[in-house]
Image: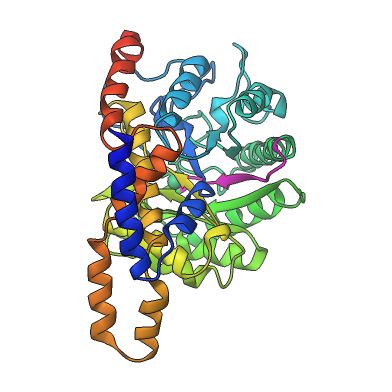
Amino acid sequence: MKSELVQKAYEIAKERYAAMGVDTEKVLEQMQDFHLSLHCWQADDVKGFEVQAGELTGGIQATGNYPGAARNIDELRADIVKAKSYIPGTHRLNLHEIYGDFKGKVVDRDEVTPEYFESWIEWAKENNMKLDFNSTSFSHPKSGNLSLANPDEGIRNFWIEHTKRCREISEAMGKAQGDPCIMNLWVHDGSKDQTVNKYLYRSLLKDSLDKIFATKYDNMKDCIESKVFGIGLESFTVGSNDFYTAYAAQNNKLITLDTGHFHPTESVADKVSAMLLYVPELMLHVSRPIRWDSDHVTIMDDPTLDLFQEIVRAGALDRVHYGLDYFDASINRIGAYVIGSRAAQKCMLRALLEPLATLRKYEAEGKGFERLALLEEEKAMPWQAVYDEFCLRNNVPVGEEFIADVEKYEAEVTSKRA
Ligand SMILES: C[C@H](O)[C@H](O)[C@@H](O)C(=O)CO
Ligand SMILES: [Mn+2]
């Protein structure tokens, strides 16, 4: 797109927003400081690089068989570099433990050490990315239906050991990058059918978490992620929202809000202002649930916009970490990263462009009509011109230009993968 056209449209948008009391230059600065954590697992349908890798379990599914998934660490790294070249700003990479650089060695989950992530730390530095991390309790012979909440002490201890080691790896990453590594803990533990022993499973999970978190670290932050249900685990989830919210509040841990992990009519956005009064920070897993936790590619939809607006309205921009979490195997995977990341950025941009001072003035004066009218009008304001300018200033394609580029990479690279 012609840069003069983009700039012209931006100048007009800037004036329109200024008339509403919104400074678009300040917003563009804030956008530059808004870092997404790209989830490595979109590139290969959550397979990872374990030599002994099994099939995907744990109640999650990557559906579709679009060709071109990354088959090894080099391909995955190349795909991330490609995807990020279409996303304005600087971003982080969120790794799962199964994506270690195992160099052909069988390394079981209770044997993993920071050594297997050294090349990732180097690579991230070279590519101006910071790393976040996740323990991996699924896709393993000991996963079953219960890991950290398993009544079998041997299995429970295996997963406790794994998760402790993942915290050690996160600490090494955080130290090397001079910025805390955010480590997420999600376990699928649950039951397909009715259980009569919920209290036991939850007390075992609590006890496992206490053991895992006993070591204090300075360069990593722990977050815990709840879920409503998994496939094959429909009746009961040990790590429910109530369980983890209470645990995080009592133990000063971060909560991960995955937008696919709640009842379909439940507002995730509404949780932000409630939780931030009791927990230090939040991690997001921005996703798009269709009927269930289907992990469709994030788009600029109302739930995502509401979520980012609630963060901005709470003045909590720097108390939230912005991870993405979807894995669509039915479309071009690099395209999926770009669509989801740019959609999340557009939601954040629109949230930052809100004429909050005027809206709050109306609210304080009891002017309900005026508040609603302005909320409606802001939807049609020229935020797109501001996003285009953001792309232009960051030297990434403006508008739909990236589609042809992604197609080219597919033709030249990903389509050649068997
Ligand atoms: C692969 C991720 O860790 C996983 O998606 C988890 O975060 C989740 O959301 C499970 O439903
Ligand atoms: Mn998630």
Magenta region: 177-189
Q: Along the horizontal axis of the image, is 182 left or right of 372?
A: right
Please determine whether, in this image, residue 41 is positioned above or below residue 324.
above
Q: Is 115 colored magenta in this rendering? A: no
Q: At 64% from the left edge and 40% from the top edge, which residue is drawn?
A: 163
Visible in this render: residue 418? no
Front residue of 417/394: it is 394
Q: At 48% from the left edge and 71% from the top edge, which residue is drawn?
A: 273
Q: At 65% from the left edge and 42% from the top edge, which residue is drawn?
A: 160
Visible in this render: residue 361? yes
Could you say which quadrant of the image residue 295 lies in? top left
Q: Is 181 colored magenta in this rendering? A: yes
Please determine whether, in this image, residue 10 is positioned above or below residue 171.
below
Q: Residue furthest bottom?
A: 365
Image quarter (top left, top right, bottom left or bottom right) of the N terminus: top left
Q: At 70% from the left edge and 40% from the top edge, which residue is drawn?
A: 174
Front residue of 132/250: it is 132
Q: Along the horizontal axis of the image, is 409 left or right of 241?
A: left
Please determine whether, in this image, residue 389 is positioned above or below residue 104.
below
Q: Residue 85 location in percent, x, y? A: 44, 28
Front residue of 185/257: it is 257
Q: Residue 399 location in percent, x, y? A: 28, 38
Q: Residue 154 location in percent, x, y? A: 64, 38
